[in-house]
Structure formats: structure tokens, C-alpha cells
């Protein structure tokens, strides 16, 4: 009788602490050959820590890692790569100024007479692309590629290093629905070839669409193991958060047509340093008590629009049009506009400062936080603890550096700071990116409450379901222009997707 084939990779009894925080508590995870194994859980459940252990970024305090049934010691990502483990991070690790071929082979370059053999590198990209359906122009410069193609380059890089187990961390967070669908086709091709995929995601629809098995973590422990064909989204949610969660639309009272705009954009044109128009004649308004959504494929002008509306991109000599806040031109960063950026690390937080300090940024002059000429450390901590409790932020302490929080909890900290300011206008990008299903419910409810209080909300999101659930109107951008405006209760994924692709909605 033939011996049973061992798992491609296995984690046995993994425990990992960071000071007083128990991130993983005796976790077992078995990844079979040729399967897509989804790993899901709330923010702070221990998913990222567990994958960091598997990829050699963290050493476990106890437990074993096995590869093809044999114990291995992973002291670094280099060890993981040597054992056939590859990881595609949510924030791509590519060199924008290099070509696809150069990025794929960097660190494992084919050489000829001691120098990089570019022809061989290009052939390798073409070979892997043909084998796995990951076609990308080897000579293209990465900075010129759409987000979806850049992700392919990251996967090609791992495959070039002979990865047999691929870990993908929130792979669709920055993809359009079409790009996500193409990624799933790639993952199926990869597993048909005998490789294994670990899919770390918050999007349960994706798990049910593409996964084979699911492991659920809560509080650092396994709370459920499921076969996708035999489970439902509600079962997964219960394992994740301990209760059911039903998505709901949050309709508000439609703002009266004659109500003045709290935020208005008039014929806005924004040009880059080379004089190329990134926005062309964009006009719209957001009334008090209204949520206006913005949809579009990455690079359609959303970034430039948000920068102009928030005053982060002051009008230049080659720009035209105007952004008005309660009838006044926006010329610089406005205190009356709360802003939650997509890049919570680079734009929204100071990594080396504490959670408490990050939570009071922008409110340093508040009388309640001051004692004489300076800030009161006790008052800052009290404010921080109040926000941590109200927004269910998981952290070891309000004095811990914000960089120690999981991505979802860092996002909630930024939301707590900005939404608690009660400004007339809120501009928010990707509010639930990387956030678990329980937190998504809470964030959606908070935005609906802000709208119902009379705040004007401009919501940019790649989650079409989120836009349909929250927005009174959805603006679709393509090529730096608004090509469609669709009432939230009339929007469908098909209608939005067609407009995002540049066809009439």
C-alpha cells in the first residue's frame, strides 16, 4: 500500500509572543499539494504573524515547521526561499525604474561571463508566463504597469525562485474586479501544476469562489477548519467573530436638490510635472448629509482628485478650475476636512510615535489636552483610551508604537482620530481595506452616522459592494474624467464595471 503523500507545508503547535501579546497560541496548519488554502480571521487574529513564521520573518517560541514531511529551520526569508516557500506581500516590493525581467530575476540573476544575461532573464519571464498564464512584457518598466500586472511580476519573481508554496497576503486589495478574476485564473493554473497557495484575505466571497479549504483564526487560535464546497459565508463569519453578520445597505434621507454644497469641484483640471492632464474638467458636489462614492480602475484620477480636494495638491500654474469648501476655495490642507488616506503608513501615521500620540494628531491645540504651554500626557492617554474602546482598536497599550498594530487596527486608529473630529467634510479612501468583517460593519455604520449628522462624505473605494451599501450617488472615473454618475440604489456591479472599463454606464 503506497505511503500517504505528506503536506506540502505544515505548521505544528506554533506559539509566538511579542512581550505580553500572545499572537499565535498552539496553531496547527496543514497545506496540501495543489490546493488553495485560505487563512481568514479578524484583524489581530494572528494571520500575519503565522505567515511571517512560515516565511522565516519571525521565529516561533515553540512548535515545528515541516516541508514535505521533514522538519526545517527557517531563520530568514532566504531560508524559506531555499525550501521552496515564496510570499507576495500586500505592499509590492518591486523596483519601479527596472524592467519586468530585471525585477523577476533580481537576487537570482542568470549571468553570462559574470554579468546579467538580460536575454536569458527575458526568456525566463516568457517561459513562466506561458506555463502559468502570467504573461507580462519582459521589457516593460514596472512604474508604467497597471497594479494587476505588477502583482503578476511579484508572483513571477517567486516562481523564478522555484517556489512550490505561494503565500499571498490580501492579494486583491488593490485590484479591480476584472483584475481579481484574472488573478484567480492564475492561481487555479498554479495549483493545477501541483503548486500550493495560501490565500490570506478578508474577502469571504473570494474564499468561497476560489478556495479549496479554509482555516479560521480568532485570538491567535484556530476556531474553525472548513472545506469550501461544504461551508457558507455565515459559518465562516461565526468562526471569525463569534456571531453572524449580515451586510446591509445604509440609505439616508436624500439631500434636497437646493441644499448648498459643503464640497464642490468645478471644472477641475490637474496636470503633472510634464504637463499631462491627470484630471480633465471634473465637476461635482457633495451636500451636507450625503455620501458620494468614487469608483474607478487604479490610475483613473482618484489620487489626484483626493489630493486636490484635501488641499495636499495646491493648485499649480497649469491647473484650472476650483475646489470649494462651503463656497471658499481650498488652497491648502484644510482643518475643516477630515481625511483618511489609503496609505495609512505613509500618509496617516507616524510609525515611531505611540498609538496615543497618533490618535491626537491634529488636536494638539485642544484645551482638553493641554496643561499650560504643553500637552498633558495623562489627558492624551485618557483621550486615546476612550477612542480605543469606542472603535475596538486592539493594541497592547496606548503607549505602544502604532507600527506594532496590525494593518486593520492601524486603519481603525486613523478612522477613530478623523471621525471623532466632527468636521463638515470627510474624505475617506478605502475605509475597510485589510479590515475584518466585524470591523467593516462598524466602519460602515460610523460613516452612515456621520452622514446622518449632516456631514458631507466623499468615499473612494475599490469595493463595489461597499459603494453600493453606503453611497447616495456613485461617480465613476476613467482616464481622469467622470464618465458616469449612478444613484446608489440603482448601481450594480455590471453597470459600475462597464463604466470603469470606459464604456457607457
Image (cartoon, rainbow, N blue to C red):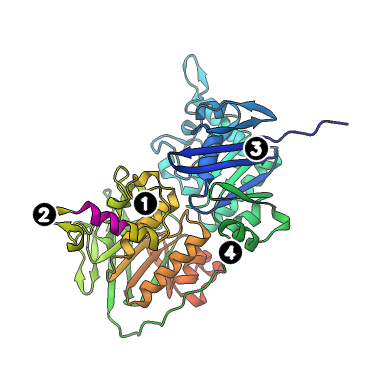
Which segment is the magenta one?
376-384
The label nearer to you, 2 versus 3, is 2
Label 2 to label 4: alpha-carbon separation: 48 Å
Q: Residues within 10 Å of mark 3 (few under 14, many from 20)?
A: few
Q: Is residue 383 magenta-colored?
A: yes
The image quarter containing residue 126 is top right
Report the residue marked by disc 4.
243
- Judge whether residue 361 can be spotted in this image: no
The label nearer to you, 3 versus 4, is 4
Label 1 to label 3: alpha-carbon separation: 37 Å
The tag on residue 373 is 2
**Secondary structure mostly seen in the magenta stretch:** helix
Label 2 to label 1: alpha-carbon separation: 30 Å
Q: Farthest residue in the top direction?
A: 113
Q: Residue 338: x and y, percent?
A: 29, 63
Q: Secondary structure at mark 1?
A: helix
**Closest to the observer: 268 or 418?**
418
**Closest to the observer: 79 or 392?**
392
- N-term mark: 1 or 3: 3
Label 2 to label 3: alpha-carbon separation: 66 Å
- N-term mark: 1 or 4: 4
Q: Is residue 198 left or right of residue 461?
A: right
Q: Farthest residue in the left direction?
A: 373
**Closest to the observer: 18 or 351?**
18
Tag 1–tag 4 contact (CB < 8 Å) = no
Report the residue marked by disc 1.
344
Q: Residue 150: x and y, percent?
A: 48, 43
- N-term mark: 2 or 3: 3
**Residue at figure coordinates x 66%, y 40% from the top left:** 31
The tag on residue 131 is 3
- N-term mark: 2 or 1: 1
Amino acid at each position: 500500500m503506497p505511503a500517504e503523500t505528506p503536506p506540502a507545508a505544515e505548521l505544528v503547535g506554533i506559539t509566538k509572543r511579542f512581550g505580553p501579546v500572545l499572537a499565535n497560541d498552539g496553531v496547527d496548519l496543514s497545506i496540501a499539494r495543489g490546493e488553495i488554502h485560505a487563512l481568514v480571521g479578524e484583524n489581530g487574529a494572528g494571520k500575519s504573524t503565522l505567515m511571517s513564521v512560515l516565511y522565516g520573518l519571525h521565529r516561533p517560541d515553540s512548535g515545528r515547521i515541516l516541508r514535505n514531511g521533514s522538519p526545517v529551520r527557517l531563520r530568514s526569508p532566504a531560508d524559506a526561499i531555499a525550501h521552496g516557500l515564496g510570499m507576495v506581500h500586500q505592499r509590492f516590493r518591486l523596483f519601479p525604474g527596472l524592467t519586468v525581467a530585471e525585477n523577476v530575476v533580481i537576487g537570482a540573476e542568470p549571468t553570462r561571463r559574470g554579468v546579467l544575461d538580460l536575454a536569458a532573464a527575458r526568456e525566463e519571464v516568457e517561459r513562466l508566463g506561458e506555463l502559468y498564464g502570467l504573461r507580462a512584457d519582459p521589457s516593460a518598466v514596472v512604474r508604467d504597469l497597471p497594479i494587476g500586472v505588477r502583482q503578476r511580476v511579484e508572483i513571477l519573481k517567486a516562481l523564478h525562485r522555484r517556489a512550490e508554496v505561494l503565500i499571498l497576503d490580501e492579494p486583491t486589495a488593490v485590484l479591480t474586479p476584472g483584475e481579481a478574476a484574472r488573478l484567480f485564473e492564475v492561481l487555479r493554473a498554479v495549483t493545477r501544476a501541483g503548486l500550493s497557495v495560501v490565500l490570506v484575505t478578508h474577502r469571504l466571497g473570494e474564499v468561497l469562489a476560489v478556495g479549496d479549504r479554509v482555516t479560521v483564526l480568532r485570538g491567535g487560535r484556530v476556531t474553525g477548519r472548513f472545506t469550501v464546497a461544504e461551508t457558507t459565508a455565515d459559518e465562516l463569519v461565526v468562526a471569525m467573530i463569534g456571531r453572524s453578520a449580515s451586510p446591509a445597505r445604509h440609505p439616508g434621507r436624500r439631500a434636497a436638490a437646493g441644499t448648498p454644497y459643503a464640497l464642490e469641484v468645478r471644472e477641475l483640471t490637474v496636470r503633472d510635472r510634464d504637463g499631462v492632464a491627470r484630471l480633465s474638467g471634473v465637476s461635482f458636489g457633495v451636500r451636507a448629509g450625503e455620501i458620494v462614492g468614487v469608483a474607478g480602475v487604479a490610475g483613473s484620477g482618484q489620487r489626484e482628485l483626493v489630493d486636490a480636494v484635501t488641499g495636499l495638491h495646491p493648485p499649480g500654474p497649469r491647473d484650472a478650475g476650483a475646489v470649494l469648501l462651503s463656497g471658499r476655495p481650498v488652497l491648502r490642507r484644510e482643518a475643516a476636512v477630515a481625511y483618511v488616506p489609503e496609505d495609512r503608513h505613509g500618509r496617516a501615521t507616524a510609525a515611531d510615535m505611540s498609538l496615543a500620540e497618533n490618535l491626537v494628531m491634529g488636536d494638539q491645540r485642544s484645551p482638553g489636552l493641554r496643561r499650560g504651554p504643553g500637552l498633558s500626557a495623562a489627558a492624551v492617554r485618557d483621550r486615546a483610551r476612550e477612542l480605543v474602546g469606542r472603535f475596538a482598536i486592539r493594541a497592547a497599550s496606548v503607549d505602544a508604537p502604532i507600527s506594532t498594530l496590525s494593518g486593520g487596527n492601524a486603519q481603525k486608529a486613523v478612522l477613530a482620530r478623523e471621525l471623532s473630529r466632527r468636521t463638515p467634510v470627510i474624505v475617506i479612501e478605502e475605509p475597510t481595506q485589510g479590515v475584518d468583517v466585524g470591523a467593516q460593519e462598524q466602519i460602515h455604520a460610523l460613516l452612515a452616522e456621520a452622514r446622518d449628522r449632516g456631514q458631507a462624505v466623499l468615499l473612494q473605494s475599490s469595493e463595489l459592494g461597499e459603494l453600493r451599501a453606503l453611497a447616495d450617488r456613485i461617480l465613476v472615473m476613467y482616464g481622469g474624467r467622470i464618465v458616469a454618475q449612478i444613484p446608489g440604489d440603482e448601481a450594480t456591479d455590471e453597470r459600475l464595471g462597464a463604466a470603469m472599463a470606459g464604456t457607457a454606464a
